[in-house]
Amino acid sequence: MSRPTTWIDENDPLVTRPKVALHDHLDGSLRPETLIELAVDARVTLPRTQPRELQYWLRNFGTVEPGRDWEDLFGLSTSVMQTAAHLRRVAREYVHTLAADGVVYAETRWAPEKHLAGGLRMDDAVDAVWAGLGQGMSDVRELGHPVEVRQILSIMRTGTVGHEVVDAASRGADVGVVGIDLAGHEEGHPARDHADAFHRAEMLGIRRTVHAGEADGAASIADALATCAAERIGHGARLVEDIAVAGEALDVHSAVAAWRAAGADPASLALGDVAAHVRDARIVLEVCPTSNSEGSVVATLAQHPVALLAAAGIRVSLHPDNRMLSETSVTGEMRAVVRAFGWTHAQLRTSTFDALDAAFGPGELRERIRAEVLVPGWD
Ligand SMILES: [Zn+2]
């Protein structure tokens, strides 16, 4: 039997560096082999039934299926994740993928409201994911690659069950939940629509991240910070639109070229109010360069503003977003910024430590991982 897909170049020396994954969708991380197997069991029809063909279709969805919504794509994976057994299996295998990627701490996110069509209760779905993550953690510990994984529950921007997700998240450490997220259609569905649920979460001590600055601009990031008390921003790439380059305000497509023309000089950057706040409040962006470069933000990796944002003093961390769709990993994202922007060991190290610093897991766990794993692993 051939080995399952992991989207990781095992020969890349960066594989062995200890890593942190904060923006990693569980329903975007199914191995194609698993998606096919679970689809048979769930009686779901897939567009392709061979792993390699299905992987190609998933990666090229935008061109293979022009005009179709990205949520249709996630509908495929979530349609096979409607039972406790299937959720457990996907979560368990996800931890195996993390271990192969050299990840030592991860927070995987998924939207419980998308997994109730088969009759599961929200709490049962959360329990199932936690059980699968626990099995996976036990498997990889035995193999000598320990990984600590927790879950973040996403609220959909277009949904109406934010408070129920907060209720589920309030069970906290008992089910490995460390926070909530806001995901889905950003444009036309502002974060402030979910301000009540997020403020309740804040009162309950539940940590908060929000997808923003991907399909919409810096104002959407400001909205997430002001109305949802977001502590991290998912993507945040379009924060660059609040940074003038050589005195000129530019959109996300042209900012990097202008910055290169200015000699990539940090002194050529002037931060607006939102960008300055993100920098001064030391908010960490969960940046997903490959995912953003496949059409959601920019057309090519060379246009991606991650290096510009870092040069502007903003804390950035690197994440895969959807491993299955972008055929990537944390290792792959690190390699991508090394190739595209010449990132150094020190820059990769800083982004990794910033990610752990911004993680929502217990402080003593993060401190142990920092001191015992990251420090020796990045010396
Ligand atoms: Zn995402």
Image (tube, helix red, strand yellow):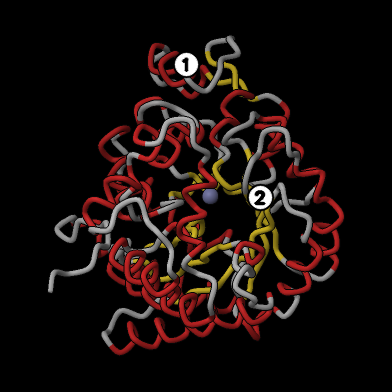
| Foreground residue among 30 and 280 | 30
| As drawn, 322 above or below 161 | above
Labelled disc at residue 210: 2
**Residue 257's x, y, as percent?**
41, 16
Q: CA–CA distance between discs 1 and 2?
A: 25 Å
Labelled disc at residue 93: none
Q: Is the residue at mark 2 in contact range of ligand 1, meaning its CB lies under 8 Å from it?
A: no
Q: Residue at x 68, y 75 (%)?
A: 122
Q: Which residue is drawn at 70% across and 58% down?
A: 208
Q: How crowded is mark 2: few (under 14 residues within 10 Å), some or many (20 or more)?
A: many
Disc 2 residue type (three-letter) = Val
| Mark earlier in primary sequence (1, 2) | 2
**Residue 63's x, y, as percent?**
36, 32
Residue 28 figure quarter: bottom left
Q: Residue at x 53, y 31 (%)?
A: 312
Residue where numbered disc 1 is placed: 254
Residue 265 figure quarter: top left
| Foreground residue among 60 and 129 | 60
Residue 141 figure quarter: bottom left
| As drawn, 147 above or below 331 | below
Disc 1 residue type (three-letter) = Ser
Q: What element carries label 1?
A: loop
**Residue 47's x, y, as percent?**
35, 51
Looking at the rendering, in which quadrant would you find the C terminus?
Answer: bottom left
Q: What element carries label 2?
A: strand
Q: Residues within 10 Å of mark 1 (few under 14, many from 20)?
A: some
